[in-house]
């Protein structure tokens, strides 16, 4: 039996191949392409074949695994790209002899691990230099931008730090022999990788090679050795990610950081926005670019900020312009908009405004013996609040020099500037000199009538003993919100500054051919019907269908039946001489109708609608009308390529980790047909809830228990025509049956995160997948619990 292998050439995202076709041809003995299409298979075993040519999907790759048994050459046809072909793609048998030696190569590479560890041991030195290099880059950016040369000079210490650390590079260079040794082994690694590419995946190779070697010669020592080597490879082969079901390939996934947004995803944001990059540094994404977030400490990828509400800060001097280094009152000056409160006995020195890992911060030193138990750095220009409103402040803070000796705590809070000036504080947890900022945030519910609001950074010294501490403060912000939002980065005199939000939608896209068999009316009205006994009112001629001047209801009805519940798009050319025109849905040619649009102007028209009747039709609307129609097309709409609107159910998997969801409501996903009538929506607050809605009423709702940890977030929901099921990270599974049917088959659009239906909170999506069937509870649990 021939060996079969997976074709891997078109298994990864490629924007140049979106919606392209690729045909696979057999080769002759010399490796030249023939004109014979090769048989392609749906699995590693079995006789089920798949189409050849293959249509690549909306991400420029196979929508499912494709296998072959003979050498082939692929020929690609892609819109906007010239036709081109691959090299010869060989099945597994060409490399079967090489498999036996792969494990030895792996062992050789493994033996070098000591050298790799030695080099890694010096990575801290490189990292130190790299962090300081980032500061130098930022200095250069300031010089090229609006900052003065004077402010650049304030950061020159960072360049000195780089110079000091340059000896670390020498230490690394001394260990370059280890790097060279590792590099020498790279050829072996590349050989293994190259073979794996040809085979499709390592697991399939090892499985076939081990089986064939063992069965062919059970007593043959060399064959047994080859099988053992193959089994070693099998043990090392990467398994399917825990979040992905083993039952089938997902239709649609967001799992590759930094990947361009493929159609039909539409991501929008009109301004720059901050994020933490893969080095753990503050960075800014240009308008329209996706913010891919990484953990500042572990550098783990957290996901993309696909859906983030707009944020307004009422503290607008966030970048500390106007600060002058020196002792305040003796040549030094606080940043514009900032002031001191109750600092008797305390000397305040502005050390400078600098950058650390991309964060712009104010370095400020407090020293002396305070006259009061608390003194403050204050921002008093915050907008006035109203009773019951929630206001949140945030900042990044750290102690850089001195100590917390005699200091009880340091924190920030929103303060009502009336009466006793009551505020709600949160405090720094790290009371040691630190290399990194900590994030401090506090929320206050306003108690007084229309008070002015302050941000206070308070230093509490209950014993009034001498203190000396230098603080770094970065990214202060005050918002009218119950939770801290994205940092705005304002530095201006206005009372507020807004940073626009991110939105992500998927679909709809058109699928299938035009359902109207005669939309051009070239010679007659075939495929259309008129009322019985009144045929002939409508006429064809000149390539149009003509409605003569009349005030009688005499419709022209398309014979093609639509599927009630599906979503469609109709396009046509309309020329109106007099009156107005009715485009409608109808059960038959009689009077009963559901209006799609009333029209009185000529031109190319397009409308999306959910079918509630089986036919589409035209007639005069409310007055005497004369008009013609032409080029009528009706196509079905779906969210994205691969979605099966006829499937009995679907499933959605989401990994939305990255936000502590202990307060408020966060919309996860809404699937709908562009109306409020037919939708599925899922949110958490903090338990996850799913509801189905039809005819402006919820027809089913279920809620899982709150997660065992607030940010546990791998969630899946699944539905068919009678029930919906939900399971979350902690294993809680709930299911509910309902009558009246699920929202109809016309679901054609996904809103990820914020929608008009529910309150919006930021949503960070790490992974997202969709399946064309309702998954069993065992499938859901296997995806979530692993």
Image (cartoon, grey):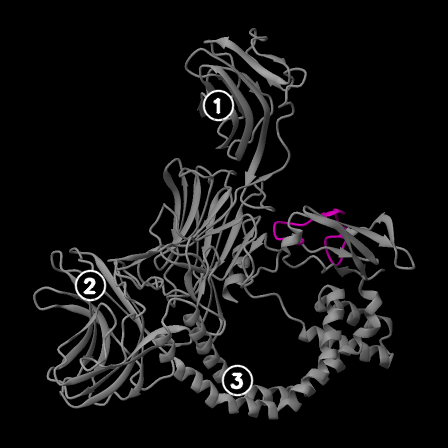
| Mark 2 or 1, nearer chain start | 2
Q: Name the residue under label 2.
A: 381
SS category of the residue bearing label 2: strand
- Residue 466 position, x and y percent, is 17, 90
Which is nearer the N-term, disc 3 or disc 2?
3
Q: What stretch is highlighted in magenta?
A: 41-62
Estimate how packed mark 2 is, as few (under 14), some (14 to 19) or many (20 or more) residues with alpha carbons within 10 Å. many
Q: Which residue lies furthest to the left in this view?
A: 419
- Residue 61 among magenta residues: yes
Residue 647's disc is none
> Is residue 21 at least partly visible in the picture?
no
CB-based contact (under 8 Å), mark 1 and mark 3 = no
Q: Are marks 2 and 1 in contact (CB under 8 Å)?
A: no
Judged from this view, the residue extending furthest toward the right is 29
Camera-nearest residue between 682 and 419? 419
Q: Is residue 603 above or below residue 348?
A: above
Magenta stretch, main secondary structure class = loop
Q: Is residue 500 left or right of residue 528?
A: left
Label number found at residue 584? 1
């Amino acid at each position: 039996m021939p060996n079969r292998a997976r074709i891997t050439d078109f298994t990864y995202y490629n924007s140049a191949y979106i919606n392209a076709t690729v045909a696979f041809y057999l080769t002759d003995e010399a490796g030249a392409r023939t004109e014979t299409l090769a048989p392609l298979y749906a699995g590693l075993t079995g006789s089920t074949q798949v189409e050849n040519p293959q249509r690549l999907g909306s991400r420029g790759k196979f929508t499912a695994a494709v296998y072959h048994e003979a050498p082939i050459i692929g020929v690609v046809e892609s819109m906007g790209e010239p036709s081109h072909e691959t090299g010869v793609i060989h099945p597994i048998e060409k490399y079967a002899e090489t498999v036996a030696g792969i494990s030895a190569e792996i062992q050789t590479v493994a033996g070098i691990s000591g050298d790799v560890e030695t080099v890694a041991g010096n990575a801290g030195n490189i990292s130190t230099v790299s962090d300081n290099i980032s500061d130098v880059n930022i200095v250069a950016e300031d010089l090229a931008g609006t900052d003065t040369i004077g402010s650049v000079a304030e950061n020159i210490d960072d360049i000195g730090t780089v110079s000091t650390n340059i000896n670390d590079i020498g230490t690394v260079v001394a260990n370059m022999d280890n790097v060279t040794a590792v590099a020498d082994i790279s050829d072996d690694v590349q050989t293994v990788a190259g073979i794996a590419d040809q085979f499709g995946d390592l697991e399939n190779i090892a499985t076939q090679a081990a089986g064939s070697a063992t069965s062919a010669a059970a007593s043959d020592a060399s064959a047994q050795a080859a099988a053992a080597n193959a089994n070693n490879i099998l043990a090392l082969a990467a398994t399917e990610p825990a979040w992905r079901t083993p039952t089938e390939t997902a239709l649609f996934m967001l799992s590759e950081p930094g990947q361009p947004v493929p159609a039909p995803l539409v991501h929008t944001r009109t301004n720059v926005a901050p994020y933490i990059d893969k080095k753990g540094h503050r960075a800014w994404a240009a308008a329209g670019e996706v913010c891919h977030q990484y953990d500042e400490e572990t550098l783990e990828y957290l996901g993309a900020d696909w859906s983030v509400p707009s944020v307004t800060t009422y503290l607008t001097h966030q970048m500390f312009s106007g600060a002058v280094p020196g002792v305040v009152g003796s040549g030094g000056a606080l940043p514009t908009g900032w002031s001191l409160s109750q600092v008797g006995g305390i000397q305040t020195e502005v050390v400078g405004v600098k950058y650390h890992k991309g964060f712009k911060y104010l370095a400020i030193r407090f020293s002396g013996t305070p006259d009061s138990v608390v003194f403050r750095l204050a921002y008093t220009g915050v907008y006035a609040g109203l009773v019951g409103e929630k206001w949140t402040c945030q900042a990044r803070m750290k102690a850089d020099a001195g100590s917390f000796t005699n200091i009880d705590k340091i924190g920030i809070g929103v303060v009502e500037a009336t009466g006793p000036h009551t505020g709600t504080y949160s405090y720094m947890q790290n009371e040691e000199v630190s290399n990194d900022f900590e994030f401090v945030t506090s929320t206050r519910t306003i108690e007084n009538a229309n008070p002015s609001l302050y941000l206070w950074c308070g230093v509490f010294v209950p014993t009034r003993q001498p203190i000396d501490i230098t603080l770094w403060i970065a990214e202060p912000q005050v918002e009218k919100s119950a939770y801290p939002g994205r940092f705005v980065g304002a530095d201006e005199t206005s009372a507020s500054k807004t940073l626009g939000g991110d939105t992500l939608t998927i679909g709809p896209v058109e699928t299938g051919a035009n359902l109207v068999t005669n939309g051009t009316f070239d010679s007659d009205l075939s495929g259309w019907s008129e009322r019985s006994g009144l045929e002939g009112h409508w006429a064809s001629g000149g390539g149009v269908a003509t409605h003569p001047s009349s005030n009688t209801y005499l419709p022209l009805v398309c014979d093609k039946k639509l599927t009630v519940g599906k979503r469609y798009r109709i396009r046509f050319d309309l020329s109106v001489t007099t009156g107005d025109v009715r485009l409608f849905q109808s059960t038959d040619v009689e009077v009963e109708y559901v209006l799609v649009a009333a029209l009185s102007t000529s031109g190319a028209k397009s409308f999306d609608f959910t079918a509630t009747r089986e036919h589409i039709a035209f007639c005069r609307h409310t007055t005497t009308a004369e008009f013609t129609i032409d080029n009528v097309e009706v196509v079905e709409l779906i969210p994205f390529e691969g979605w099966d609107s006829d499937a009995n159910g679907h499933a959605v998997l989401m990994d939305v980790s990255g936000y502590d969801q202990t307060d408020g409501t966060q919309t996860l996903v809404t699937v709908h047909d562009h109306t409020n009538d037919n939708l599925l929506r899922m949110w958490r607050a903090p338990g996850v809830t799913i509801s189905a809605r039809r005819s402006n009423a919820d027809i089913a709702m279920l809620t899982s228990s709150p997660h065992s940890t607030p940010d546990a977030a791998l969630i899946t929901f699944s539905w068919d025509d009678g029930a919906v099921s939900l399971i979350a990270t902690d294993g809680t599974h709930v299911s509910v049956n309902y009558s009246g049917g699920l929202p109809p088959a016309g679901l054609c659009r996904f809103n990820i995160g914020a929608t008009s239906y529910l309150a919006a909170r930021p949503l960070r999506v790490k992974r997202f997948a969709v399946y064309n069937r309702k998954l069993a509870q065992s499938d859901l649990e296997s995806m979530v619990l692993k």
